[in-house]
Amino acid sequence: MTNATDPRKLEAVSSLCKRRGFIFPSSELYGGINGFWDYGPLGSELKRNIREAWWNFTVRSREDVVGLDATIIMNPKIWQASGHADTFADPMVDCKDCKKRYRADQLCEEQGKKLGRDGKRFVLPEGVVCADCGSKNLTEPKAFNLMFKTFVGASEDASSETWLRPETAQAIFAQFGNVTGSTRVQVPFGIAQSGKSFRNEITPRNYTFRSREFEQMELEFFIRPDEAVELICGKVATLADNPDLSTPADDWGWEVWHKYWVQQRRIWYHEKVGLPPESLVEYWQEGDELAHYARACVDIQYAFPFGVQELEGIAARSDFDLAQHQKHSGKTQDVFDEALKQAVLKMDDAAKAAFMDKTVAAWVARGKVADDAKAFVEKLFEGRYIPHVIEPSAGTDRLALALLCNAYEEQNLTDDKGKTDIRTVLHFHPAIAPIKAAVFPIVKNKPELYDKAREIFKGLQKHWNVFWDESGAIGRRYRRMDEVGTPFCITVDFETLEQGTVTVRDRDTMKQDRIAVGDLRAFLESKIAP
Amino acid sequence: MTNATDPRKLEAVSSLCKRRGFIFPSSELYGGINGFWDYGPLGSELKRNIREAWWNFTVRSREDVVGLDATIIMNPKIWQASGHADTFADPMVDCKDCKKRYRADQLCEEQGKKLGRDGKRFVLPEGVVCADCGSKNLTEPKAFNLMFKTFVGASEDASSETWLRPETAQAIFAQFGNVTGSTRVQVPFGIAQSGKSFRNEITPRNYTFRSREFEQMELEFFIRPDEAVELICGKVATLADNPDLSTPADDWGWEVWHKYWVQQRRIWYHEKVGLPPESLVEYWQEGDELAHYARACVDIQYAFPFGVQELEGIAARSDFDLAQHQKHSGKTQDVFDEALKQAVLKMDDAAKAAFMDKTVAAWVARGKVADDAKAFVEKLFEGRYIPHVIEPSAGTDRLALALLCNAYEEQNLTDDKGKTDIRTVLHFHPAIAPIKAAVFPIVKNKPELYDKAREIFKGLQKHWNVFWDESGAIGRRYRRMDEVGTPFCITVDFETLEQGTVTVRDRDTMKQDRIAVGDLRAFLESKIAP
């Protein structure tokens, strides 16, 4: 049952998720609420593990990234500066006959057509019909802002109106000055944040994939503008120089930093959460797909049962965001760079003039204004600039769904006697498995053995989420754990009392090994956090 | 500088929080937004540690509690069932002269008076004046619902209106059936959730204490009704029986369970996050302070610089919440209890009749309806009931602030030469300290020593958030770490190369010990997670 070829896959996964407590429809007791999903006992552990794996890799294991935990409700001026207030909208179209509502671009695409534009107006191509009733009687598509509105304070008017954040990224830009002012970070460095975001999607769909409330894991990694790199290093490394992407170097330009983060994120998906490299597709946006300020954007995609869809976008956003906030707040977002200042001090006037001329010409050739280029270079000569940014932005819920789909397998087994059986198993990476190990006493009625099993269980419980199960045949206990992706089942038997060893049964191979009780912690640690 | 006696304390703490990256005003770049706070690089680690300590104690280290991670936006019927839509309001009063707005109850209290009530109307006592301009010209207080409103879907009308959750607890009740249906939990058991909640406070104040967006850590622990305990055990233990609170027993009634959770939470505050027992005050609500459905409620309070205020409420809420959801959803919230069924099977008709009579009489004596009592007992005889609940509900941000206030100290030091100096130190428990240890090479220019220090640093970084500092005198490096509460500073010196030991300097005692490099992990582990 592969994602791409079996339409039953998503149904099988979502059914397991409901049955075993991974994911429930939000508010199901009252008929639910479209586009909202809750994570149950196992799902909440799965999501905690994903968050933790991301934070460890992105923040704790690096010296050049710090964390942030900002509010969901912020001053509305942030969304005016970022452009969300004006332009964060999808085209919406209604069927005048059956009253069904669609995202106009999706409706067109499903009918092999493409939504047109005439300036700010959307134009439905000829022949598009309501997907439900077939009527051609559709409204003109209109832009619908996806931000959820609310009111802060006791009056409900424009002065108190604000929005729930549609992304976690903007708070990072808005707090850029406070972070640089309170820590020792120096460009290149990053600020990371994970948390809930909200988008009032017109048509939430594909199970948890396109939800109205979702979690993001976003990093803004600030780098020097290429011109600063050139002044400091005398050159700017590009991908054509074939740089060693495992070790950041001073001479990297934005292109190399961008590729570095694409590679880092792929390493994470593979080594830390267990998505096979071949399951991921890199989609490099081209020409008119790119936002006007973006220099490059890669989508890391996964082949879901409902199609190949984005897990993460990694964009090179130039200095667009900080420059917008500088403009709207009137407060400088410059940083001072000592290495740049020192490099400039070594230049004579002729070198400076040449650099100025070259830079202005290059900017003008890219369609920019000469005066802006001059002001930028003059700042550079003072050792100052607005950092550029690389933004790896991942969806936690999308990843949770990809991990579930990737892990899910129904195996047809035949036992010694020729009896066939289906084993449902989630092949989670141990680091993200909700339960790391289960402990079973082989029998319940031998106190010495039972107590030994409890002792082992309590010892492991100090370090991980482990599960105790004493009921039913061992084979059935294994199957219950297979279905929720528990990588190891530890059985305490009579040999444990004699030899001090237990059997550890591997979920994927179903093989059993005997391991000394004293080695259990190190064994699990080596599997969970290799 | 103690909390209670020095008004400068809160200012000193908030100034440190801003300076060192614990807490910033949200959206400060645009003038902020009243009642919202962001956590910076160190604050986000502090909050992560608090959450993690709570989750480990409440969920992972227990076999009778499971987790949940539900949405912030839910079906509005949940808030109608819970009563929040109608009654979750504070009395608001405006000064007609200076336009200043107040919470009427707080304004009265500050002037030594008490807000009156006349049915649903609030009545201002004689003589209350505007705290700002002194005017007596105040509006009549009116109820203001504290839930933030928003609209789901593309239309903005009553049919699409809902609210941001004002507490995480209700999702636990709404998902009760899905959790019991997908796991093996049996009463007594709990469901825990931590996450953001939102209250549109009329007057946010006291730094982060009363914010409009805040984080909660809530447990709903479901227990048998006392009548079921009596049928199963033949008696119901109360506090008068002086039960051993360390080990739950089958015969515990609600009163003992409630006291058990008060004790568990006090243990957590002391042992896991380091609030001294004497810093906590237990406030037992009395008579008319209790909500009508609550049997008991204890506030665990802390002496903040602005007064003794609640950190956590622990309420015995009977079956109120699940019964409300049963009534509003039309779906049973009963559980089946095999032990109860077995106990009832052993009763003869006379015993059943006697139990029925006794229970009905007791309910009627408590002001309840006889028919309700009968229906309840008949359900019990089938082995079924709606569980009662004990709710320990804690505020994450309040706790973070209490931990900061508790940890903060300015020490007057005098060195050997009589020179005096002030040392600012945060005495955090190692488990919640944002940075667990710092590693210093004693000099920068000896490659062998420097590399050894890097190796030690990278080794510890696999397990904890550790900090590298190679700049400035060791004494200054210590002070920088003292100020952010790092419990241990590890210095790599020439002896390290010869003897394989490092100095570990204790933040609180400022004493240094030599420890073998190979023992560092175990040493830190014993301090961080004892």
Image (cartoon, coloured by chain):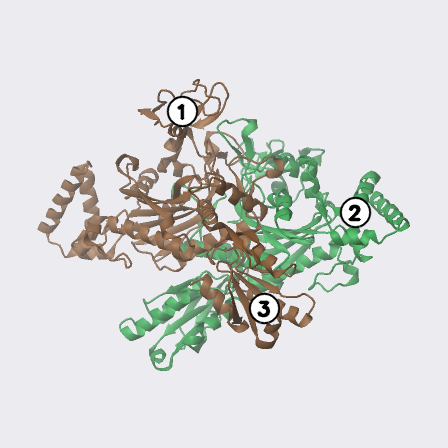
Chain colours: A green, B brown
Give neighbour class at mark 1: few <14, some 14-19, many 20+ (Cα, 10 Å).
some
Instruction: Identify which amino acid the numbered label 3 is placed on.
Output: Ile
> Could you tell me which residue is drawn at 18 percent across and 40 percent down?
B363
Q: Where's the C terminus of chain A, which quadrant?
A: bottom right
Q: Quadrant of residue B482?
A: bottom right
> Could you tell me which residue is drawn at 85 percent across and 44 percent down?
A360
- Any mark on residue B456, and which? 3
Residue underneath mark 1? B142
Q: Position of residue A23 (x, y in %)?
A: 45, 52
> Could you tell me which residue is drawn at 35 percent across and 66 percent down?
A469
**Which residue ends up furthest to the right in the rendered image?**
A350
Observer-nearest of A432 and A231: A231
Residue underneath mark 2? A380
Q: Distance of mark 2 from mark 1, alpha carbons? A: 58 Å
Q: Callout 1: helix, strand or loop?
A: strand
Q: Earlier in the sequence, mark 1 or mark 3?
A: 1
For residue A349, above or below residue A371: below
